[in-house]
Image (cartoon, rainbow, N blue to C red):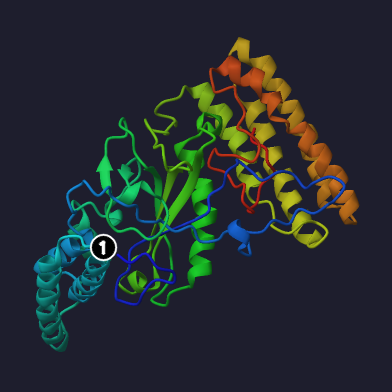
Amino acid sequence: MPLSNPPPSGPQQPREPHGPYSRGEYPPPYPQGTHDGHRSGAHGAPGPFPYRPWGQGYSPVNRPVPVDGVAIASLVLGILCFVPAVGLVLGIIALARIGRTGDRGRSMAVAGSVLSTAGLALWAVAFAAGVPFPTWSGVKHAAGDHGSAYSLTEGDCFDAPGGSLEGTAYDVDKVLCGREHDGEVFAVFRMTGGSAYPGDGKVTDTADARCYGLRYGYAMDTWAVPDYVDVYYMTPTRDSWRFGDREVTCLFGNTDEKAGLTGSLRNDARDLGADQVAYLKAVDVENAALDRQPVDSPDDDLPGSRAWAGRMSAALARESTLLRGHRWPAGVRKPVAGVAAKVAAGRKEWALAAEAPDADSFYAHYDRAMVLADPDTSVTARKALGLATTPPASGEGSGGRGDGGGGSGLDV
């Protein structure tokens, strides 16, 4: 598949991993004194969520010349005749790629294009006769065992082309999570919508909001996620949407392309005890609300900041109820009660921030809420529960946003 932006035209383009995905559980709090919480996208791009494409890597010259994966896909789709238009486009793309890279597979690309052209003629006849066309499920079925990004499901670990999570990628290699790998899928969900493509911005915003929230169900203890791990996602393109593609794939990846991930990042109810799960479900209510900090500062958008503060107050009320409502073991009861007390105090500050008459008043309550939410408050309770006790570095890793998205720079 091509690695250009915007994507080239054609009936089906590969899934686009968009980014960023931050280097921090949350961005730092609004700087005191400056009262400027607005952040711009990475590389100077406007907005909090610039595209973060996958890039193809380069193979050493002493390695055998690889077979172009898109050529293989073209041949497979041409033979199966599920979506001949896609097979034809892939064949054309493969021929162009092979001309640039020198990879093998030209004959496969030609054969796939010829078979797909014949398939298109048969489809024209079938359409005239009223025979229904295949859906996206047929494409996924055809790609299922051929190393395609379309076949990735929750819990899958994989290697990306060239080891890079930059650019547009079609070919991936599923691997065991116990060995070093480039990415791990933690969720897959379907977007809703009719036949009209909603636009890159809408798709990216939906993927961003859902993926950040879904990570808590897969890696409940965010402190156990290394600081060098970011969240990425692959989304439908305008062309694949036309063929019924609605799936967004959320994944963890290493920010350091020179080193992969080793071992699964999953930690959920299957791996944790009942008390650990109860604690993490409670604090992740707050973490999820912190994720949605507005991009604009209270100076620029006071109503938006006050609305977020209201959501934070409601989230902390829910967290306090969960912490106080669980029957904790004797050795855990006191430290968890300390966390609950800080949460209750923080809720009051957020409620006052939600009613702030001006930006200065908002900042005053915001700053007090941030002090009360200091992650160090949770260390004693976490130690008693047997959870990770090292807070994520502020503004780095743990699958949060540190590049201009929402968030406070904290994780509880």
Question: Which residue position holds label 1?
Answer: 101
- Which residue appears farthest toward the top when viewing the image? 331
Q: Residue at x 17, y 49 (%)?
A: 64
**On the picture, is 238 further left or further right than 101?**
right
**On the picture, is 236 further left or further right than 372?**
left
**On the picture, is 243 further left or further right than 235?**
left
Q: Quadrant of the C terminus?
A: top right
Snapshot quadrant of residue 359: bottom right
Snapshot quadrant of residue 129: bottom left
Snapshot quadrant of residue 106: bottom left
Between residues 391 and 104, which one lies in front from this camera angle? Answer: 104
> How many numbered dots are placed on residues in this image?
1
Residue 328 visible:
no
- Which residue appears farthest toward the bottom when viewing the image? 128
Q: Does dot 1 land on a helix, a strand or a loop?
A: helix
Q: Residue at x 30, y 65 (%)?
A: 1
Between residues 112 and 124, which one lies in front from this camera angle? Answer: 112
**On the picture, is 365 further left or further right than 194?**
right
90 is higher (above) or lower (below) than 60: below
Residue 300 visible:
yes
User: Which residue type does callout 1 highlight?
Assistant: Thr
308 is higher (above) or lower (below) than 26: below
Binning the other alpha carbons within 10 Å of mark 1 as few (below 14), some (14 to 19) or many (20 upward) gives few
Residue 226 in percent (x, y) is at: 51, 32
Residue 97 in percent (x, y) is at: 26, 67
Residue 111 in percent (x, y) is at: 9, 71
Q: Residue at x 57, y 59 (%)?
A: 49
81 is higher (above) or lower (below) than 207: below
